[in-house]
Image: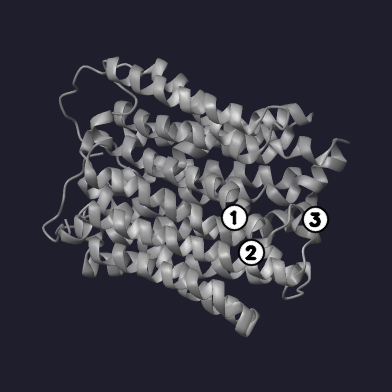
């Protein structure tokens, strides 16, 4: 999107445009988290098993993961604003269908369509913000978007639970539909159309590359989530690996590739995506492993576990905007490195302090860890989007979202395996408090090591020596 810049360096559309982009990011995050608490109610409503209704969540996650790069690339081809509007309309329509779904199959299909819209809402706000916001305020914009994602994660379960208790399982999906329509109206009003310019010959969408990438990502996601137990994870991973090889061949021959492979050979972009994956994988351990420690070692009940677990997203939501502002003030390379060091320290504290201080040690560790995460996120997104070519911003923002989602899925599987191995038991529910404590400490020491690797990747990518754009 093009817009004129005033003499003070700000763009006329910035004040009105950023709230719309923030609301779009919030909607996409709510789409994931608001449905998780509905699974028991859905199992009763449709008289089916929990393993069947879990596809209400998995369908959304799979669609987001598979479609996020395509959503970004479509923005590059057909205009970021136009594709964002289509994504909002699709999200609203799919949410309405989900709210009215007569069967579980219709609900799952609607959630899959909703996830495609959610992928657009996750991918394009980064690229539109880069176009809309003045360069010296890019960090603040990225921090705001990061805060909205964290707020959606923290707010979704409690909001969904309250709506279900009030009006049943259809209420959360109806709310998402209404909110999407409101945001769509605001986007039509507040996001300006691109400035007129000579339109080049429009390239065609890379359908072959899109299909191959979608199949590969689906196989990988199913392997990591274990959603199809009748197919071995090894077989799915082999399919995913073969698919990636085929995708590279297809993209090299494509006239208008979905992913420009030379971009992935650029040191800064490759380092950014790799760091994003490592950080997301490590952060996922707090959600996967944390509840076991809080329950079996510290002896908290479900309500208290939920309250302690909510502290991380809450702190993350509060620290996103300040992280963006310090990124603008001190430069993305410094804040990126500082955020990784802070996260490394936070994970080490998480491995050690809860055994010494109990719940207080757990909360202190989260208070150190999550601002570091938001600092990294704001700085990494800022540096990557500032460096991106204008005609590739949608694609690169989609790749950032993809690396984050793959990191979450990989971390949920790999670090859970580290936890079980360090605890020395196959069934963690039968483990002693000492075994759970040992597994917990080992998991977060591994997470700290991942942050050290990410810091090395940052240095290899020369973030620390590049001036802030």
Q: Residues within 10 Å of mark 3 (few under 14, many from 20)?
A: few
Q: Disc 1 to disc 2, how far (Cα)?
A: 7 Å
The numbered mark at residue 418 is 1
The numbered mark at residue 439 is 2
- What x and y, as percent, mark residue 103? 79, 29
User: What secondary structure is marked by label 2?
Assistant: helix
Q: Does the image show residue 93?
A: no
Q: Residues within 10 Å of mark 2 (few under 14, many from 20)?
A: many
Q: Disc 2 to disc 3, how far (Cα)?
A: 36 Å
Whether the residues at callouts 1 and 2 have beta carbons within 8 Å, the answer is yes
- What x and y, as percent, mark residue 156? 63, 55
Q: Does the image show residue 408?
A: yes
> Image point 21% across, 16% down: which residue?
201
> Image point 68% across, 47% down: which residue?
35
Whether the residues at callouts 3 and 1 have beta carbons within 8 Å, the answer is no
State the residue in front, 131 or 347. 347
User: What secondary structure is marked by label 3?
Assistant: helix
- What x and y, as percent, mark residue 320? 41, 65
In the shown orientation, is residue 316 left or right of residue 160?
left
Q: Going by the picture, which residue comes out furthest to the left? A: 7
Sequence-wise, which precedes: disc 3 or disc 1? 3
State the residue in front, 65 or 141. 65
Q: Quadrant of the N terminus?
A: top left
Relative vertical location of residue 273 with respect to residue 75 in this rendering, above or below: below
The numbered mark at residue 165 is 3
Q: Quadrant of the C terminus?
A: bottom left
Name the front one of labels 3 and 1. 1
């Amino acid at each position: 999107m093009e817009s004129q810049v005033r003499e003070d360096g700000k763009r006329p559309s910035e004040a009105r445009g950023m709230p719309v982009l923030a609301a779009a990011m919030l909607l996409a995050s709510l789409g994931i988290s608001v449905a998780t608490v509905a699974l028991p109610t859905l199992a009763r409503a449709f008289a089916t098993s929990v393993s069947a209704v879990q596809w209400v969540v998995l369908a959304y996650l799979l669609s987001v993961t598979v479609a996020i790069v395509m959503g970004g690339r479509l923005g590059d081809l057909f205009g970021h604003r136009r594709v964002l509007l289509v994504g909002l309309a699709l999200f609203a329509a799919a949410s309405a269908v989900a709210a009215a779904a007569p069967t579980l199959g219709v609900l799952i299909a609607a959630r899959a369509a909703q996830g495609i819209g959610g992928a657009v809402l996750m991918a394009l706000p980064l690229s539109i913000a880069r176009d809309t916001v003045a360069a010296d305020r890019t960090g603040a914009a990225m921090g705001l978007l990061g805060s909205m994602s964290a707020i959606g994660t923290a707010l979704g379960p409690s909001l969904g639970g309250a709506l279900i208790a009030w009006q049943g399982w259809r209420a959360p999906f109806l709310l998402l539909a209404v909110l999407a329509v409101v945001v769509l109206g605001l986007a039509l009003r507040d996001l300006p159309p691109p400035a007129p310019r000579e339109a080049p010959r429009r390239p065609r969408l890379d359908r072959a590359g899109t299909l191959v990438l979608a199949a590969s990502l689906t196989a990988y996601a199913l392997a990591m989530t274990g959603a199809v137990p009748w197919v071995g994870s090894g077989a799915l991973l082999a399919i995913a690996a073969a698919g990636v090889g085929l995708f590279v061949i297809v993209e090299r021959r494509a006239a208008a590739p979905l992913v420009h492979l030379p971009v992935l050979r650029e040191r800064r972009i490759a380092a950014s995506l790799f760091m994003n994956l490592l950080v997301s994988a490590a952060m996922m351990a707090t959600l996967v492993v944390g509840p076991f420690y809080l329950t079996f070692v510290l002896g908290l009940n479900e309500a208290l576990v939920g309250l302690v677990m909510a502290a991380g997203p809450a702190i993350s939501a509060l620290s996103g905007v300040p992280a963006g502002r310090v990124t603008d003030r001190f430069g993305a390379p410094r804040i990126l490195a500082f955020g990784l060091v802070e996260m490394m320290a936070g994970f080490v504290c998480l491995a050690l302090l809860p055994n010494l201080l109990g719940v207080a040690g757990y909360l202190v560790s989260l208070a150190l860890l999550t601002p570091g995460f938001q600092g990294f996120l704001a700085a990494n997104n800022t540096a990557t989007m500032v460096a991106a070519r204008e005609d590739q911003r949608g694609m690169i923002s989609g790749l950032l979202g993809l690396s984050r989602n793959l990191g979450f899925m990989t971390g949920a599987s790999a670090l859970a395996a580290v936890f079980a191995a360090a605890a020395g038991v196959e069934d963690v529910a039968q483990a002693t408090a000492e075994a759970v404590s040992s597994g917990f400490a080992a998991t977060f020491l591994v997470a700290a090591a991942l942050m050290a690797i990410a810091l090395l990747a940052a240095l290899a990518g020369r973030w620390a020596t590049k001036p802030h754009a």
